Image (cartoon, rainbow, N blue to C red):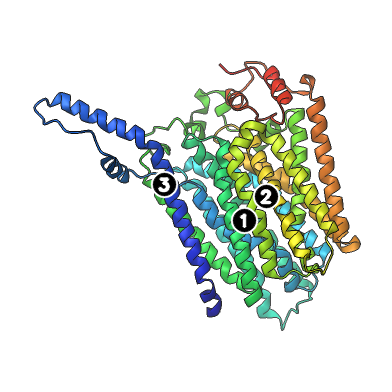
Amino acid sequence: MWGLVASNIPVLSTYLVLIRNVAQSQSTEAKRGDRREMSVAMMNDDANEQQQCPTRNNHSPLSSKDVDRKEASRSIAFRPRLLYTAIFVWNTLTVGKFTAPLLQLLSSRFSDSVIGFTFALQYGVVACLAGWGGALADAQERKSSLWGWGRLKVLTFALSLGTLAFLGHFVPEFLQGVFPNNSTVVLIWHISMRCVYAISFGIVAPCLDGLALAHLDCIGSSSADFGKERMFGALFWGLGNLSAGVCIDYYGFDSLYVLVVISTFASYVVMGIYLWGLKNDMTGAFKSHGNDGELSSNSASEYQHEDAKDSDENDEMMSNRELLFKVFKTGYGRALLFLVFTLAMGISVVDNLAFMFFDSLGASSTMDGWTVMFTVIFEIPVFYASPKLLERYGPGKLLFAAAIAYIIRVVGYTMVPAGEVYTMFIILALETLHGVTYAGSKAGGVEYIACMIPEGYEASGQGILIFVTYFSVVAGLIMAGWIQETLGARFMFRVMAAIVTVGVIVFLLAEVFYDEAHTETHSKEESEPNEKCHLMKSESCASSASAFADVETERCVPKFD
């Protein structure tokens, strides 16, 4: 045990240094944006003082060092990328690609089809609870006197629950004399632990993404900038998988329990640092009911439900059903979300079952970890460039590119020979396409939902997105697990490629035949200003896969004056 901890000291040191650098870089970036404004303001103040005190000796304008000293006393909140670093390491260990091999080790009853069923059940729970989890986070946030504290409380609870559920897998090892490894009781126990973990994940995912979107809104950034925050999660997802793979090869799967505990406490520390930054923020961007009853212009919409009787319809509390109808209200939007549905089905199969296929090709756990690092190689730059990609092409084309990359990748899997020296090198090359697939689908889906959902419902909107995608995950894993066990992994990957191809065809047909008659329009009085602002704010938003769709949107939705 102590050898495991000692071996992870370099990894933990690197992790802490990266967190420090992320915090410093984001703080410096935010401060740099205010440098010129602050310098001008201080010079104006000095000029006013000089006019009011003519007998005061003249002095030269403030130097850059003086400005730096003034800035040092002005605290700026940490960006949500800080949260993604720690929580995605935790995600890697608790629900990452090593989960399937771990389950096979925990019970001999976990065949390919049973693992597929277990994951399907797990993500089914996530799909059912994601909308509720997002709504819970938003509700707690509206009750909080400190901006961000409501969602962070929910996030802390969910992380703790998920950690306890994962550690629950270790319990049967103490009862092997009573319940052997192949007993039905042990199998049911492990499946139950995955379901309890699913409750946690169904809260963590929409809560974290909703918090990030709300933070960006408060500081005046577009939801398209979400990818720049999310790419830090991708980076630490890769580092976490690589570290886990090395530890498994040297110390076995039991090392995951130690790493999960470490990552949980690291997440608590990071959330504390983030909350400390919010408390000491002096920019005035983050305000709640506790701030003298005043709300900032960026965050006021999150709390207008208190004055719903005196406000517009858009400020009234909306149910998840109303939000879901809002997302599916156009024919083009339904086609785009069908593409999201099929693509999520395919991605889930690779994320949960690929390591078993790689092991059959002769890969070690360390090599499995390296495959994830190669996925991150392209994932990070796509996330970073996502604002410009969304501005130029829109969510639709980003999702289309993600689907094409996925099809090429999994078809490539089926052509790789087993047992050759170069086998895993081909797999590593194919894994780079996952960056385009995952980052494109995530950024495109989040942007589409953000454009359709009113402000103040960020976590609820992401919960709906998870609801849609994870129901596809359930169907995909049940089907894929059975096909892999009966017909083999290669045939299963061909079926997944065919399903995603169907999603692409439906999407292209919607783009070609999209017509004003298929769009549910509203009159000027019935239309919601917030939605129209979103639709017209960027080149492509709710209907954004092509210039044709953009023109149709402008025809169908009156511009907001």
Specify the amino acid type for callout 1. Answer: Ser
Single out the residue that lies furthest toward the bottom: 177
Q: Is residue 47 above or below residue 496?
A: above
Specify the amino acid type for callout 3. Answer: Ser
Location of residue 558 (image quadrant): top right
Residue sitting at x 88%, y 57%: 491
**Few, some or many residues within 10 Å of mark 2 (<14, 14–19, 20+):** many
Helix or strand or loop: what does disc 1 sit on? helix
Question: Can you tell which mark lies on residue 435?
Answer: 2
Question: Can you tell which mark lies on residue 285?
Answer: none
Residue sitting at x 79%, y 25%: 514
Can you identify the residue that label 1 sits on?
200
Q: Quadrant of the C terminus?
A: top right
Q: Are marks 3 and 1 in contact (CB under 8 Å)?
A: no
Can you identify the residue that label 3 sits on?
27
Residue 510 placement (x, y as % from top left): 80, 30
